[in-house]
Each structure stands twice: as C-alpha cells, then as structure tokens.
Amino acid sequence: TSTGATERLAMIVIGIDPGLSGCVAAVHSTDGYIGTEAMPLATKPKGRRTNRVDIKALARIIADFRRLYPCDPSMGVIEEIQSRGGSDAMSGIAVFGMGYAFGIAHALLAVRTDELIVVSPRRWKAHYGLDANKAESVACARRLYGSRLPTQFGHNRAEALLIAHWGLGIL
C-alpha cells in the first residue's frame, strides 16, 4: 500500500565539465557524493601529456563510477561548450581541443548512461546563483557535500560536481 510519500528514484548521475582541464564527477540520488576525477589526457611515447583526452581512460572512469551501482539507472550531464570572444578569446588550437574533449565525453556518456543531457553553463550556474567566480563554485560544492569532499578540491572538480548535482535536481 502507498503511504502517500513520494519515493525518489535511485540513480547515479555523472557530470562532465569538458575540456583539457575539465573533470568528471559522480553523485548518487540516495548516497550522495561518489567522487571526482580529472579529465585524463593521452600521453606520447616518452610520457609527455598531449592536448587530447585519453578516450580509454575516460571510458574506464565512467565505467568505474557505473560499476558502483550496476542496477541503478544512470544519467550523464555534460556542460555545453561555448566560444569566448573579446580579450578572453580562445586560440584555434584551444577551441579544437575543447571541441574534441566535448565530443569524446558526449559520445562516451551517450553509450555508457541511460540518459544524456547537455546543459549550458548559464543554466546550471543560475540554479545555484553562481556566475564566473570559480571560488564561489568551490564554496557551493562544499556547502552541498561538506566533509565528503577532499581537502584539495579545485574549481574544475567543483564545477563537474555541481553539474552532476544539477542533474539530480531534474529527476
């Protein structure tokens, strides 16, 4: 019999802030914070990092997060990339790298999660009352997940986590 209470669907949400300095984060609708990982970059034969996402490593990160809750449905949320103009304009190489990272992450989320949402930075940041201030993103993530976050927790990880948490809010 129903008690009238609305039960929340148990779901894992994987959020990605794409780009070469981006991150991947995972949260669970009932268990909360799962973890964050830096966007893995491919290496050249001598061990130098490239400006390309390591596709296999990113696939492993997503699979490892999914493996924690294999029976729960999943959602992937990725931040839409936008070009910047003016004095903050990105070089052609930077734009290519960002587009490449977005495309790889988008494709992997599409095949590794049950649902995929692309969200604009403006939309998810407005949800938290944030602007471009990176320190505020870290503070917001700490307010939401507190002591579960590592001591060293930068803005890239915070933004990926906030993107994932935003996904929980639209369930």
Image: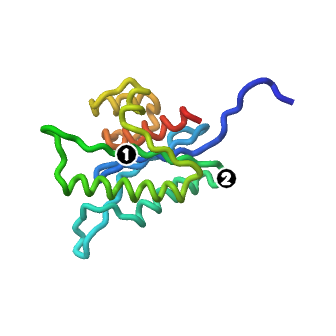
Q: Is residue 74 left or right of residue 96?
A: right
**View extreme (left): residue:** 87
- Residue type pointed to by label 1: Asp
Q: Which mark is residue 71?
A: 2
Spot occupied by residue 35 in the image (x, y as percentages of width and height): 46, 46
Q: Is residue 114 left or right of residue 86?
A: right
* Circle 1 Cα neighbour tier, 10 Å, few/some/many (<14 / 14–19 / ≥20): many
Looking at the image, is mark 1 or mark 2 earlier in the sequence? 1
Q: For the residue labelled by badge 2, is the local secondary structure a helix, a strand or a loop?
A: loop
Spot occupied by residue 43 in the image (x, y as percentages of width and height): 28, 68
Seen from the viewer's position, the closer of residues 87 and 154 is 87
Q: Which mark is residue 17?
A: 1
Classify residue 86 by image quadrant: top left
Quarter holding the C terminus?
A: top right
Height in image: 160 above or below 112? above
Identified at 33% across, 45% down, the residue is 81
Q: Are marks 1 and 2 in contact (CB under 8 Å)?
A: no
Identified at 54% across, 36% down, the residue is 168
Residue 64 seen in the figure = no
Seen from the viewer's position, the closer of residues 52 and 158 is 52
